[in-house]
Amino acid sequence: MNGNDAIAEILKTEGAEYLFCYPDNQLIHSCAAAGIRPVMSRTERTTVNMADGYTRMLNGEKNGVVVTQAGPGIENAYGGIAHAYADSVPILVIPGGTVRGRINSNPDFDAVANYKGITKWSGQINQTGRISEFLRRAHTFLRTGRGAPVLLGVPSDVAMEQIEANPVTYTPVKSIKSSGDPADIKSVASRLIKAERPVLYVGQGVLWAQASDELVRLAELLDAPVATTNSGKSAFPENHELALGAAGNTVTKMARYFVDNADVIFGIGVSFTTNLASMGIPQGKTLIQTTVDANDLNKEHHLADAIIGDCKLVLRQLIEEIDAQTSGAGVEHADIRARVASVRNEWLEEWMPLLTSDETPINPYRIIWDLMHTVDRDKTVVTHDSGHPRDQLIPFWESTVPRGYLGWGNSTQLGYSLGLVLGAKLAAPEKTFINFMGDAAIGMAGMDIETGVRLNIPVMTIVLNNQVLSGYPARYEAAVEKYGFTELYGDYAAIATALGAYGERISDTAEIVPAINRGLAEMDKGRPVLLEFMTSEENRLSRYPAAG
């Protein structure tokens, strides 16, 4: 047994099913021999994105493992790992390395040093006798507290060195979680009971903690409406009477109205960070927060109260305390459900002309609306790329089950959704997976349609092709006028067909639903699908100014 064999054996013990990899690294051979299936995409970034999607879909119960070659391999992976770090996804990255005697000798790329800024921990196994120790440490960081990538460098001589002690002795690492301080629980429960217009503002911490049931119970106990962040979307069923929908870069009218008019906002599994993935929190509100990471506290806003702890455990504590303080009666806010329904109906009436438009080229909102009413949302997982596909989809897609929507946006790398959905499908093969891309995004990652074909991963990619970089032309008037700077061209359905997938180009609104059904039928045969819809450049987005 050599060092790589020992690493592979430990990864297998930790439950690794897949090795998201790109040659050349001999660890791939050792993992395959140990029964861990190598999964190779066309680029290292997509490889990382696949590990990311796999990990999200399993809520970190298993962590995607990424293996690259030394030097250019781990250099090319940087964008994907930065994205996972921005979105708090715990993946394990094991790059190849040079021999110990050549470390830090130019032009050697020191992955351990260069990745410290976008990993939770970046370490290096410096001798075979410490392999178990380092992997135990790595998995502890992956499964405790806020999620983030962990990088473990392996010098090539350590990887190939023979180990006398055989077999490796290793016990899998358990996830360690903590409840909230009882005093904090009492204080927060009291504030929530006394609030006149409370809103629960929910992030992806609820999804990672698998606390959706507890969230629904708390919302009903408090009679409080629930808005989610971009990445928290699907943590609360959006067909619930108290659902306000998503509050991201684009926002439902319900979320904007009730957040703006709240007296108390309880952030659950959120960082309260203002960026492209959030709507922003108005000033002057009483804010309460629960999170696993103390770095999130009192960041942009003053907090009246806070609880550090796992969302599932904290919500259970709060439910018990609110029950006790209200003698089991909970809280009632007159007509809250009727008011949510009224604003929702007003909002949908405003947007229905676009959602049901018969115009040509096809309006992208019509595609979203028709898809949502064609698939079984309880058994479907939808995600998006950045830019207009994200901004148009997030408010209007109604999520019904946890992880039925993979929202993201703390980093906005084009092309990310394809790798994400391919990896997520490996984690939940029984689900139907669909990702939305623009014509710019497919240009970044489109060759990995072949990855889905080669690996028999049947997912549906919907390309919204308006032949232009939406949202950008107004910024570059001279460049657009003189050189056609933001115009894009391509027959992406033909490219998908050439790569072995089912490809179809659609230009008629009457063919939207039939094309979706044809695609679903092809997926049932195990074939990836790309539906290319020729759309208008739709720049109207669901955005509403904050009150005041």
Image: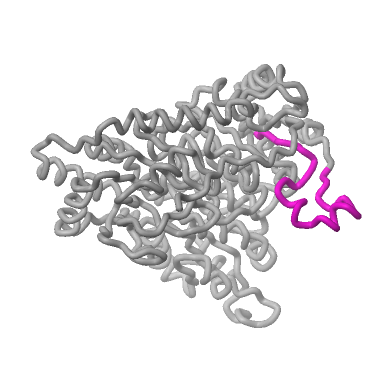
- Identify which residue is drawn at 22% across, 54% down: 179
**Residue 503: image location, x then y, percent:** 75, 28
Task: Please check the rendered image and state whether residue 478 is part of the magenta-colored stretch, yes or no.
Answer: yes
What's the residue at 49%, 69% (across, down)?
Answer: 122
Q: Where is residue 315 in the image (x, y as percent from the top left)?
A: 25, 46
Q: Is residue 167 visible?
A: no
> How many marks on residues?
0
Judge from the rendering whether residue 468 lies leftward or rightward of residue 368; answer left or right. right
Q: Nearer the viewer, residue 192 or 368?
A: 192
Residue segment shown in magenta: 461-488
* Residue 329 quadrant: top left
Q: Is residue 189 left or right of residue 176?
A: left
Q: Can residue 345 be seen in this view?
A: yes
> On the rendered structure, is 339 left or right of 459?
left
What residue lies at 85% left-to-right and 58% top-to-bottom?
478
Query: Vertical placement of 159 versus 543: above or below?
Result: below
Is 372 part of what is drawn in magenta?
Answer: no
Residue at 42% x, 55% y is: 282
